[in-house]
């Protein structure tokens, strides 16, 4: 027994000693980490912009020539090139063969490829209708003129009346042309003879990079769309397949030196080897132009010593040339982090991330959009998960509140006070009626919308009056039985647009819904659906219930393109104004604001628990930067006055003048096909629209629960499962319970 | 020796006690703490959250519907399951078969059960189709007061088998010799049931009642999956409210509500236990 006690005691001493020793090691490790932090490893890839020559007009592409970067441009008179030497652009030179292709062959080069044989190849389209048919590949002939080297089989007109559509190409060192076709097959042509073709891979876009060539090797994306296959160009034998294990649509591959290849997309630049299997990240895309949705990469080149050049087309207008280079002095690991959270990916936020990142390269920005195409988790579950984070004092530093319970966050003190920031924004010229009316509590501003949608209406005065309130709507139906109020529409579009329009009038003083008024409205809506013949329209067009939610709009009275009826639309940018303005012009009507409503978009708030308050504030300010606000991304109009003014100038630029959209629809009454071709509204119209935007004062912020309940119950009413009275009762009961909570 | 046995008992209890502490007791202690604080941060607000919850109209309604559901369901379930168990005891040959049959609903996954209910009670569902055959007018059953009855039926259907098994176990505890002795003394079936079976079912009834009570709270899954966050008011229960409060970040109200509910349930169970002890003493 005594021995046992002594043994136990000895064991206890050993255990205690071991634990103490562990503590010592732990504290040593902590010191080491601290030291490491102080020293902090240096060196990482950084993005730097190379300003394009001021005289450059339409940019075609870039090429590496004798270790110099060459930029190809065009204007009305022809094609030119600039060479970048020692940090400056040398004077422009004529590219006679490209100009010759345009003038003599009638083919306009729209994109360039650098062949491994040392030539530059241009992908060209007919200058005008009636010229040579289909896509062509042009190169410089020995005499300096343009030579069409399109393989003859590619110019054969097929049964559908088209020639082969090229989505990508590469030229091998022996002059063999590899062409990736729209059907996903990559074919190699020696002169006009097909020497090899691959199996078909998935192609979704008319310009989709999926191949490249180095000396002796061709790299083509695999049939699974997630791997790269390497072929020996002597015998077209597949040598190796490297699994990248991610969707490669939208990814580029470019050759480096000594069997090394680079794959480039929004994730960043990664390195693979022909004979290897590992994918190594060279530079993360976050915060660089390649990660934003506001610009498209049109050329990516490998320079020398792992220096890269990327040429981007910016959707807001113009091009940008970026250089990616290893910076030995930049901290390898960015110790500061700024996290941004939103339900949906948003281009304005992406642009602001880019602006912020260029100002703070030392900060790692993590922009997380919870709902992506692959997400199958319901939004309510996503919000619950976010709430759990916020309650525990964590969560992202910046919250993009679109679709999130902003009012609840303000009430619970989740969001930081942004009143001071708002004052600064007002000085910069941001619309204060918008900023100051959206997310306010006790005269303090807790969130700021960086964009806004504008609900507008136009039409006959009597019909517009019917959209004033539920009583006027009822009276109109009584006076004009059998007369359509809207153009071709669905029961969801008509019902939800009218409900949203009348929401304030249907509300009680306590904030609930007036059951009697709602029942009357639902009855009138059912009558309207009958008059509008929505059932047969939906049947004929194969429209399924649920399309309203997918549209993510609050106001859209119909899809009919012609007619004298009233139209209610929610404009979310210049592009969205094109068709409605043409319709208004054709009707001889003026586009007007709907009850001075604006729908706040890109509503940014700062997590009160964030330890990066200052950085978060700076980021929110970036959302209101002129360069960000000027973009027309379809996520709302700018709220910065100077950006609004710019819109009037923009519609007169050559780029905007050339821009047009075409929409087509079948008239449900006559069965006639109606087409509308629309360009941007005129400067005067945009000036008037800007005036409307500057005068907007009333935020339309429908609670998601109310909207979902109304939509769900209206559907049951429409399907005849319950009467209008029963529907109104159910809606009111649910909304009352919701409000009582 | 006794102390040693006690130590051994505690040692055996330790793992489950640790699990309960980590996953139930400590989180519940945090819930109690949060019920005295603001939703976010550590600002102490005293009983303000409790006052707010008690004044909350939705809470009152949810309590009312939950109590109503329990008051209707529990007696019905206990009665039906007891009656069925008694009948099964008289059919020794078919007992095993029926026992399995009644237990089957417990094996049906809730998700498929919900789809089945929807198929039946939807506006264009099976029930309305049948009613139309007899020229009755159908309706969206889950949006009417019928939703309550549907939920009651669903609860009883799902839990009947489980309770039957428990009752059969309790009934088999009654010695056969007692019935034989009573019959020799001239007692009929009713007297045997009234004076032998029923008095010995008290302990079993408390246990089965408590288990059925706990299971009744699980019916929220069905109610939520059939009718969502905001069902017809008759089936809007405390769990709906707590769920919605969490989505709205009303964690303080949720905590206060949960503490009050736990307290009420504890008091109820304590009273039941005392009554049971008193019955045993008698």
Image (cartoon, coloured by chain):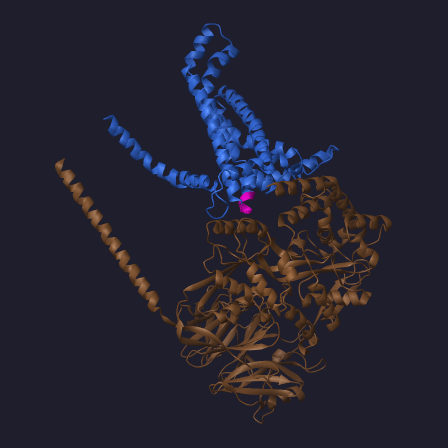
Chain colours: A brown, B blue
Question: In the picture shown, does residue B142 fall above or below A365?
Answer: above
Quadrant of res B224: top right
Report the residue at 53% width, 54% height from top. A415
Specify the segment rendered in magenta: B244-249
* Of residues B267 and A586, the one drawn nearer to the viewer in this rendering: B267
The majority secondary structure of the magenta stretch comes to: helix
The foreground one among A1 and A489 is A1
Q: Quadrant of the C terminus of chain A?
A: top right
Furthest-left residue in this view = A2
Magenta run includes residue B246: yes
**Is residue B96 visible from the viewing direction of this image?**
no
| Image location (x, y in percent) of residue A413 | 53, 51
| Residue A614 x/y as whole percent | 48, 62
Q: Quadrant of the N terminus of chain A?
A: top left
Give the image quarter of residue B239.
Answer: top right
Residue A308: x and y in percent read 47, 78
Is residue A155 a member of the stretch shown in magenta? no
* A678 or B88, nearer to the observer: A678
Q: Is residue A689 visible?
A: yes
- x 43%, y 64%: residue: A336
- The residue sitting at 66% across, 38% down in the picture is B143
Question: Residue A59 appears in which quarter of the rendering?
Answer: bottom right
Please tell me whether residue A239 is drawn above or below residue B191 in the rendered image.
Answer: below
Q: State the residue lying farthest toward the right.
A: A479
Q: Is residue B120 above or below residue A117?
A: above
Image coordinates of residue A220 in percent, x first then y, are 50, 72
List the single residue furthest toward the bottom.
A143
Q: Nearer the viewer, residue A413 or A388?
A: A413
Q: Is residue A114 left or right of residue A554?
A: left
Q: Is residue B151 left or right of residue A323?
A: right
């Amino acid at each position: 027994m005594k021995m046992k006690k002594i043994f136990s005691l000895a064991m206890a001493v050993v255990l205690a000693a071991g634990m103490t020793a562990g503590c010592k090691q732990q504290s040593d490790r902590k010191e080491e980490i601290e030291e490491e932090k102080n020293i902090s490893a240096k060196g990482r890839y950084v993005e730097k912009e190379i300003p394009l020559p001021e005289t450059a007009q339409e940019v075609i592409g870039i090429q590496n020539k004798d270790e110099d970067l060459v930029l190809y441009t065009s204007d009305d008179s022809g094609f030119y090139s600039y060479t970048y030497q020692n940090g400056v652009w040398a004077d422009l030179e004529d590219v006679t063969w490209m100009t010759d292709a345009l003038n003599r062959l009638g083919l306009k080069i729209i994109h360039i490829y650098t062949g491994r044989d040392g030539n530059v190849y241009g992908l060209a389209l007919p200058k005008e209708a009636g010229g040579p048919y289909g896509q062509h590949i042009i190169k410089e002939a020995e005499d300096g003129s343009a030579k069409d080297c399109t393989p003859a089989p590619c110019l054969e007109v097929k049964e559908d009346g088209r020639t082969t559509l090229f989505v990508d190409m590469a030229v091998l060192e022996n002059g063999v042309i590899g062409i990736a076709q729209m059907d996903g097959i990559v074919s190699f042509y020696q002169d006009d003879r097909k020497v090899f073709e691959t199996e078909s891979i998935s192609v979704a876009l008319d310009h989709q990079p999926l191949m490249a060539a180095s000396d002796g090797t061709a790299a083509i994306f695999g049939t699974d769309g997630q791997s790269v296959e390497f072929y020996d160009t002597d015998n077209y034998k597949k040598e190796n397949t490297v699994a990248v294990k991610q969707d490669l649509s939208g990814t580029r591959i470019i050759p480096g030196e000594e069997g090394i290849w680079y794959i480039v997309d929004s994730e960043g630049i990664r390195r693979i080897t022909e004979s290897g299997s590992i994918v190594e990240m060279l530079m993360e895309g976050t915060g660089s132009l390649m990660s934003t949705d506001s610009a498209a990469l049109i050329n990516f080149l490998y320079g020398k010593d792992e220096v890269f050049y990327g040429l981007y087309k910016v959707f807001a207008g113009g091009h940008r040339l970026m250089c990616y280079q290893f910076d030995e002095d930049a901290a390898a690991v960015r110790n500061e982090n700024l996290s941004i959270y939103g339900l949906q990916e948003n281009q304005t936020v992406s642009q602001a991330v880019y602006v912020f990142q260029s100002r703070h390269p030392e900060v790692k920005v993590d922009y997380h959009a919870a709902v992506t195409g692959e997400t199958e988790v319901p939004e309510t579950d996503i919000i619950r998960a976010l709430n759990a984070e916020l309650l525990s004092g964590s969560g992202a530093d910046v919250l993009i509140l679109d679709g999130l319970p902003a009012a609840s966050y303000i009430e619970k003190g989740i969001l930081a006070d942004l009143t001071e920031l708002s004052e600064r924004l007002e000085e910069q010229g941001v619309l204060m009626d918008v900023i100051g009316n959206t997310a306010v509590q006790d005269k303090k501003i807790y969130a700021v919308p960086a964009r806004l949608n504008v609900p507008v209406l136009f039409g006959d005065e009597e019909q517009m009056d019917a959209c004033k309130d539920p009583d006027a709507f009822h009276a109109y139906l009584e006076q004009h039985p059998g007369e359509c109020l809207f153009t071709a529409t669905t029961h969801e579009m008509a019902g939800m647009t009218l409900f949203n329009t009348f929401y304030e009038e249907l509300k009680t003083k306590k904030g609930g819904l007036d059951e009697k008024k709602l029942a009357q409205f639902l009855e009138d809506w059912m009558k309207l659906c009958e008059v509008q013949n929505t059932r047969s329209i939906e049947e004929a067009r194969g429209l399924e219930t649920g399309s309203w939610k997918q549209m993510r709009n609050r106001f859209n009275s119909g899809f009919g393109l012609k007619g004298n009826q009233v139209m209610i639309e929610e404009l979310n940018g210049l592009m969205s104004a094109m068709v409605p303005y043409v319709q208004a012009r054709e009707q001889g009507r003026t586009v007007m604001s709907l009850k001075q409503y604006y729908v706040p978009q890109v509503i940014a708030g700062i997590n009160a628990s964030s330890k990066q308050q200052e950085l978060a504030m700076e980021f929110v300010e970036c959302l209101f930067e002129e360069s960000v606000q000027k973009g027309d991304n379809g996520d709302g109009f700018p709220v910065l006055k100077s950006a609004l003014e710019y819109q009037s100038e923009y519609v007169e630029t050559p780029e905007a003048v050339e821009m047009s959209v075409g929409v087509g629809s079948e008239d449900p009454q006559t069965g006639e096909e109606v087409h509308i071709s629309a360009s941007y509204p005129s400067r005067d119209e945009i000036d008037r629209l800007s005036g409307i935007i500057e005068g907007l004062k009333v935020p339309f912020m429908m609670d998601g629960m109310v909207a979902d309940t109304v939509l769900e119950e209206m559907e049951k009413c429409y399907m005849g499962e319950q009467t209008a009275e029963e529907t109104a009762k159910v809606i009111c009961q649910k909304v009352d319970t919701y409000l009582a909570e | 020796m006794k102390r040693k046995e006690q130590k051994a008992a505690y040692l055996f209890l330790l793992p489950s006690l640790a699990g309960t502490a980590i996953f139930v007791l400590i989180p519940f202690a945090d819930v109690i703490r949060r019920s005295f604080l603001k939703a976010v941060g550590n600002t102490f607000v005293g009983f303000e959250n409790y006052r707010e919850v008690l004044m909350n109209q939705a809470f009152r309604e949810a309590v009312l519907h939950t109590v109503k559901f329990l008051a209707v369901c529990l007696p019905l379930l206990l009665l039906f399951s007891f009656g069925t168990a008694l009948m099964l005891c008289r059919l020794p040959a078919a007992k095993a078969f029926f026992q399995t049959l009644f237990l089957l609903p417990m094996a049906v996954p809730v998700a498929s059960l919900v789809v089945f209910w929807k198929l039946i009670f939807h506006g264009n569902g099976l029930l309305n189709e049948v009613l139309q055959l007899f020229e009755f007018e159908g309706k969206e059953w889950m949006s009417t007061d019928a939703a309550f009855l549907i939920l009651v039926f669903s609860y009883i259907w799902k839990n009947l088998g489980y309770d039957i098994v428990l009752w059969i176990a309790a009934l088999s505890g009654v010695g056969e010799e007692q019935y034989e002795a009573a019959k020799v003394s001239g007692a009929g079936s009713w007297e045997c049931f009234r004076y032998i079976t029923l008095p010995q079912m008290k302990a079993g009834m408390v246990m089965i009642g408590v288990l059925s009570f706990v299971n009744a709270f699980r019916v929220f899954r069905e109610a939520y999956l059939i009718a969502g966050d905001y069902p017809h008011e008759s089936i809007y229960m405390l769990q709906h409210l707590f769920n919605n409060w969490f989505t709205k970040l009303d964690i303080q109200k949720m905590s206060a509500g949960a503490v009050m509910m736990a307290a009420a349930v504890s008091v109820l169970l304590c009273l039941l236990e005392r009554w049971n002890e008193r019955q045993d003493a008698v």
